[in-house]
Amino acid sequence: MKKNTIIFILASLVAIVTLYSCTKIQRTYLLKGQWEIDSFTIGGGSENMVAAFFADHEAGNGKMILNFSNSGVLKSDHYSFGEIDSTLFGTWSMPDYETNVVRLGDLVDATFTIEVVDPNHVILHTDKNLIRFYDIGEVTSVIEVSKVQE
């Protein structure tokens, strides 16, 4: 009887660890690849700050693409008038399955909570994003991104 109980407990622990590991791998895999920023708001506002950060964003039908690489490198390309006009490099990591730590130039230095709307739409939000651009400082931020379809 004791032997069966021990086997059951060990099997349960293995199942729990496996399920937790799969969730973390799935979340990490979910963010890898290219994502387009749909909006980047700060301080509880509704204005998309990408237009404020990049001069030709609105006039040039701009878009900003983030590439979350396997190695933890984050590359951001801003396009306007159909061509890349700015590239930033940074880092990203996922210390747990609900958290994304992002450092990207003077625009992002924060630990975000990940909200998965669906596999192609993710919202990152934080109470403390240090934006050095124009000495904005530490503000709340919400970044909505959509998976780039290849």
Image (cartoon, grey):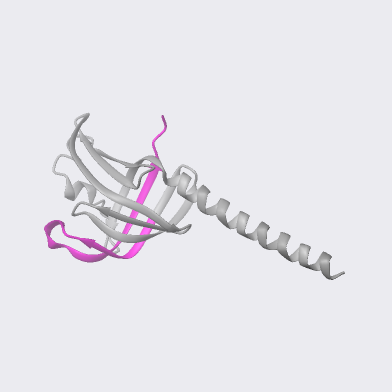
Q: Is residue 69 above or below residue 44?
A: above
Q: Residue at x 42, y 46 (%)?
A: 31
Q: Residue at x 37, y 46 (%)?
A: 145
Depth check, front residue: 2 or 138: 2
Query: Which residue is situated farthest in the front direction here?
Result: 3
Write down the quadrant of residue 103 in the picture: bottom left
Q: Residue at x 13, y 62 (%)?
A: 135
From the top left corner, tell me how far across and down residue 71 is, in percent: 36, 44
Depth check, front residue: 51 or 140: 140
Write down the quadrant of residue 65 in the picture: top left
Depth check, front residue: 60 or 146: 146
Depth check, front residue: 70 or 82: 70
**Main SS, magenta residues:** strand
Query: Which residue is situated farthest in the bottom direction here?
Result: 2
Query: Which residue is situated farthest in the right direction here?
Result: 1
From the top left corner, tell me how far across and down residue 87 is, in percent: 20, 40
Q: Is residue 4 left or right of residue 97?
A: right
From the top left corner, tell me how far across and down residue 48 is, in percent: 26, 51
Queried whether the magenta region covers residue 138, the answer comes back as: yes
| Count of numbered badges drawn on the protein | 0
From the top left corner, tell me how far across and down residue 134 is, in percent: 12, 58
Q: Quadrant of the N terminus?
A: bottom right
Residue range highlighted in magenta: 124-150
Queried whether the magenta region covers residue 17, the answer comes back as: no
Q: Residue at x 16, y 59 (%)?
A: 132
